Image (cartoon, helix red, strand yellow):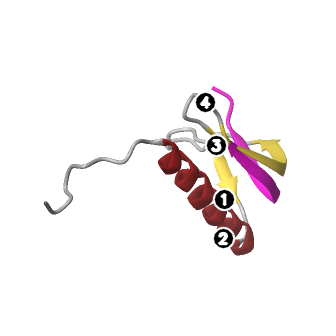
Amino acid sequence: MKIHNVEIQKFKAASNSPHGQVMLKMDALITPRAPVEGIEPSSMLIMTEANARVLMALLKSQLLQFDATKPKSRHGRPG
């Protein structure tokens, strides 16, 4: 497995696919990362607080779009 540091520079857009995936368009700096001995190798996603807030807003918007396409459930509604 290859591991990387992924540093988000800027989020540009978000969209949903018909297959239930959220796709994010971004500028990112991706560099190889050496594994640390004794720790499971993992890639790291690195971003500023401002970019984290943008990510939250984009994800919230995309989840609302998923919810808008699902039929409304009658379960749990007071009768």
Mark 4: secondary structure:
loop
Q: Earlier in the sequence, mark 3 or mark 2?
A: 3
Query: In the rendered image, which residue does mark 3 sit on?
Result: 43
Q: Earlier in the sequence, mark 2 or mark 4?
A: 4
Q: Residue at x 54, y 55 (%)?
A: 64
Query: In the rendered image, which residue does mark 2 sit on?
Result: 53
Q: Nearer the viewer, mark 3 or mark 2?
A: 2
Mark number for residue 18? Answer: 4
Q: Residue furthest left?
A: 79
Mark 1: secondary structure:
helix
Reply yes or no: does residue 9 show up in magenta.
yes
Q: Earlier in the sequence, mark 2 or mark 1?
A: 2
Q: CA distance from mark 3 to mark 2?
A: 21 Å
Q: Is residue 53 above or below residue 63?
A: below
Q: Is residue 49 above or below residue 23?
A: below
Question: Which stretch appears magenta?
Answer: 1-15
Query: In the rendered image, which residue does mark 1 sit on?
Result: 58
Q: Nearer the viewer, residue 21 or 42?
A: 21
Q: Nearer the viewer, mark 2 or mark 1?
A: 1
Estimate the x, y position of residue 1 in percent, counting from the top left.
63, 26
Q: Residues within 10 Å of mark 4 (few under 14, many from 20)?
A: few
Q: CA distance from mark 1 to mark 3?
A: 22 Å
